[in-house]
Amino acid sequence: MSRIVIIEDEPELAAGLRDNLEFEHHRVALAPTGAEGLKLAAQKPTDLVLLDIGLPDIDGFEVCRRLRAAGATMPIIILTARGQEIDKVRGLELGADDYVTKPFSLRELLARVHAALRRAERKPAAKLQFKVGERTVDLVRQKVILPKGELPLGYYESEVLRVLHEHVGEAVPRNELLERIWGVGVGPADRTVDNHIVSLRRKLEPDPKNPRHLLTAHAVGYKLVL
Ligand code: CA
């Protein structure tokens, strides 16, 4: 049983999500505004946040940024409108883990919730830190440490880096990343891995347009070079 906070201002959508998650024995708290959601997520240990982008007060990006800035490491799944690739990347950049596109199928959303909760349960066995150029990746704290400051990593970003680091210097096929991280049957669109790479490049590369560490292996996948 997990505690899930839903931050969504459409009452019918929020109630539908709550009913389905409660049916699966999760405890659910609903927040119709960003401020209320931040409060609920801070009140009690929270295992997962479902976060709408368009909220009546502060937007979902800001909610995500504030959660991560406060040190929260639970998975955050953002709910975004169709075709908003920019939203997706921006959300990931701010430390969200995954996104679903509205209107979504309930089945897809629940599959992603389950996958995120399963991932979150698996704590890393050992402390894992490594340098990527001038920056340090800390997979336990889910941060990129810069010479000045830190950037948050989402769960899936951390997992992408973990798998690429296991095969450092080698190309890892996109399919392998999808299978190992998102799980077979979840069926994320093909852009899932690519959006996470775009977001990771912004965190790891001094010049994200000319990557030197997170390289595209043409027609195969991606490769990490330290
Ligand atoms: Ca909304």
Image (cartoon, helix red, strand yellow):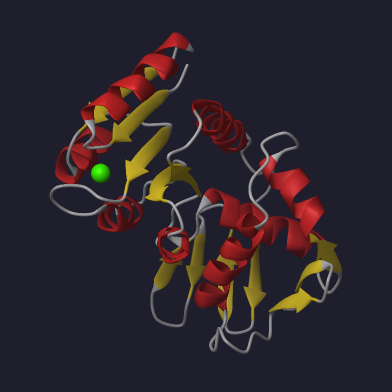
Q: Is residue 113 above or below residue 99?
A: above
Q: Residue 215: image x %, image y %? A: 73, 78
Point 81% across, 52% down: residue? 176
Point 32% across, 32% down: residue? 6
Q: Residue 198: image x %, image y %? A: 57, 71
Q: Residue furthest left?
A: 57
Q: Quadrant of the C terminus?
A: bottom right
Q: Is residue 178 above or below residue 112?
A: below
Whether residue 225 is visible here, answered yes or no, is: yes
Q: Is residue 39 above or below residue 219?
A: above
Q: Nearer the viewer, residue 179 or 224?
A: 179
Could you tell whether 39 is left or right of 64 in the image? Answer: left
Q: Residue 165: image x %, image y %? A: 75, 64
Q: Residue 210: image x %, image y %? A: 62, 89
Point 58% across, 67% down: residue? 137
Q: How many marks?
A: 0
Could you tell whether 141 is left or right of 176 in the image? Answer: left
Q: Nearer the viewer, residue 48 or 140?
A: 48
Point 23% across, 34% down: residue? 10
Whether residue 128 is visible here, answered yes or no, is: no
Could you tell whether 191 is left or right of 51 in the image? Answer: right
